[in-house]
Amino acid sequence: MKNRLIKNKRGEDMLVDFWAILVFALIVLLFFILFAANKKEPKIQEIHAQFSQNDANFMLQSFLKSPAIGIDSTKTVFQIIIEDYNTGDYSRSDTLAKNYFSQLKKYGTYPVGAIYLQIDDDSLFFTTIGKIELHEGRGGITDETGKNYYSKCSQVSEAIIPSPGDKKAVIRLDINVYYDSGTCPTTE
Amino acid sequence: MKDIRKKGQVQYFMENAFRIGFLIVALVVFFMLINFFILNKIDTKEIQAEIVVSRILYSDAIMYEDENTLRVYSGIVDMKKFNDETINAKINYPIKRHATASIELIDNVEGKIVETIYLNKAQYDNLNILASGDLEGKGGATKYPKTYPVTYYDKGNYKYGTLKIIVIVPNS
């Protein structure tokens, strides 16, 4: 019996088949991983990013057009910011922004970490951090429920405001949102 | 000399059974890969939700509209229109098994809910149970919460508030 097995060359064929199948299976597995990683998610991410951009635009535009409550309701926030820009004192704009964005604690289901409003010369005049209890967790930021957030993403919108001379100042709203996925939504 | 023993035929069959099995696996994999290429199922739930939200924010359904110029001031909520009747009249989908929404207005100073209205409330009540249960599949529903800071105009006064919109979209 033993001699018959040694003499039988069909065993070699099986061995060759085995390696061929193994290589084929690995290639198929590689294809699966590539397809699974790249197929539908980017499209959904792109849609998400585009609508996020719309949200930031809506928030900045409605803030600028809203009446300056508590300062002068006959004027818009936009007018107050221009006045502050010319004087260099942003205390009134700061108050208006704080009052306006005070309840924006979450963006969808994701916590808002900070909101920045700045003019093109990078003079930051409003920031709020830690609206939600966030602390460093294992591999990311953790909220009060223990949920982990791994990436901090920005929803940005810009608007041009007139300023003295030919210079055009750009006002920028930057909302930092913590996401539980590893990457930020992108339109690219 | 030709071997006519029956035992030999069984032996060849046993060897080929392995190859036939592999062929079946290869074919199954082949068809699965083709299915990866064909996109005949597109998940549009999030787009539906965003469209409903955009319609609420940018239309005259709840936002202030100048009577003379008919210009809509998106971002300024008119409390005279902030009720179920108006929003359901302004945003009326003929198909009732559509996306539904609850819109909650919170006062920024007091931090209290000023009012909550519903777009298609009967549908909202039904879908809210399904969405809250995290039921996946065609019979379920998905919640999409959104938050926007706004100004609201109530009895001649402007106030800062926040709109919390929860859109629920049926999975099928």
Image (spheres, coloured by chain):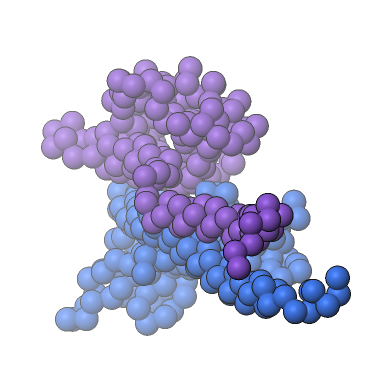
Foreground of the two, A123 or A72: A123
Q: Which residue lies furthest to the right in this view?
A: A2
Q: Where is residue A171 in the image (x, y as percent from the top left)?
A: 34, 70
Residue for point 69% across, 66% down: A141
Which quadrant holds residue A155?
bottom left
Check the image and report above or below for B48 versus A172. above
Q: Position of residue B37 (x, y in %)?
A: 39, 56
Foreground of the two, A51 or B9: B9
Residue for point 53% across, 66% down: A28
Foreground of the two, B1 or A71: B1
Residue for point 48% across, 17% down: B122
Q: Where is residue B107 in the image (x, y as percent from the top left)?
A: 52, 39
**Which colour represents chain A?**
blue
Q: Residue furthest left?
A: B69
Q: Can residue B154 be seen in this view?
A: yes
Q: Give the chain ID for the purple colour.
A: B
Task: Identify the image quadrant of the C terminus of chain A.
Answer: bottom left
Instruction: State left or right for residue B137 relative to residue A93.
Output: right
Residue for point 43% across, 41% down: B45
Which quadrant holds residue B155?
top left
